[in-house]
Structures are given as structure tokens and as C-alpha cells.
Image (cartoon, grey):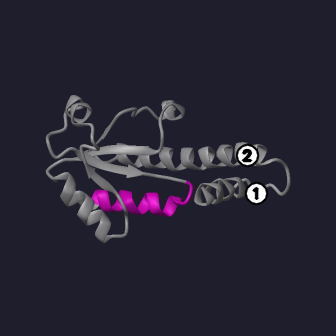
Amino acid sequence: VAGTMEAVEYLADLSGVAGGTRASRLDVAYDRLNAHEHVLAERFMEGVERLDHVRLLGVTDRNQLAERTATFLLDVRNHRPGDVASVLGERGFFVWHGDFYAPGAVRSVGLGPDGGVRIGLAHYNSTDEVDGVLAELEALR
């Protein structure tokens, strides 16, 4: 319980607002977090569009960013998801691979039994990190 309260306070502190109720600070913080993640997601999606060997699954229209999270499922041509995740991990990018406990959903978007690569962007990520992971994906061409 104490850890949960600290997590809530951490999020409220991200508002940058001194004073006010915790709820109002959380509202401001979430607006700021969403705006930052929107910038990161748009940059990532724009970069992936230039990588003809990388397929982005799910909502791919940047005009629909408000309808998705900044978490992406990728298929990198001629590379197994586990190998892509290992390479990215060695370069300091923490990603996940597999079927994410949803094998039916992963198959329904055309991925095989190895699944895909999941890249999640959050408030603690930077545009430099987005550019870095895009460069590493480019290098897998």
C-alpha cells in the first residue's frame, strides 16, 4: 500500500504544479504525459514508415494517434523477434518479444508462432532514444 501511494505521489509530482489537490495534479500530470508520449509516438511512427523492412501492426495512421498507446508491435523482415529484441537490448533499448500471452491476436495480424517485437514508449523516454531505436532498426536492413 505504501508503494502504491508513493507511485501516485510520483505521478502527481510530474505535474510540476505546487499545491492543489492530488487529483488536480494527477490530471495535469496525465495531460503532460499524454502530450509527451504523443510526440514520441508520432516520431516513432514517422520513422518506421521509412523502414520498408519493418512492419508496424495495429493502428498505423498517425492521424489516429489519440486512439492508441505509445506501444508498438513490429515485424522485422528476415529477423526472428527474439533476435531483434536481443540486438536492441545489447544497444540499451529494452523491448520485449513473443506473443504477449495473446497467441490468437498475434496470429490474426499475420505473425507466426514467434510473435513480434514490442516497443513501448513512456514519459521517461526521449526523442533521442526514439531516434536511436529507429537507427538500430535501420541497421537490421
Residue 123's label in the rendered image is: none
Instruction: Read off the residue under disc 1.
Output: 16
Q: Which x, y percent locates residue 84?
A: 23, 58
- Quarter of the figure that contains the C terminus: bottom left
Q: Does the magenta segment cover residue 129?
A: yes
For disc 1, the neighbor class at 10 Å (few under 14, some 14 to 19, many from 20) is few
In the depicted structure, whether residue 126 falls above or below residue 116 = below
The local secondary structure at tag 2 comes to: helix
Q: Does the magenta segment cover residue 31?
A: no
- Quarter of the figure that contains the N terminus: bottom right
In the depicted structure, whether residue 22 falls above or below residue 140 = above
Instruction: Read off the residue under disc 2.
Output: 28
Q: Which x, y percent locates residue 7?
A: 61, 57
The residue at 47%/44% (across/down) is 70
Q: 72 left or right of 85?
A: right
Q: Which amino acid is tagged 2? A: Val
State yes or no: discs 2 and 1 in contact (Cβ < 8 Å): yes
Q: Which amino acid is tagged 1? A: Gly
Of the two numbered discs 2 and 1 on the same chain, state the one appearing first in sequence: 1
Q: Give the range drawn in magenta.
A: 123-138
Q: 52 left or right of 129?
A: left
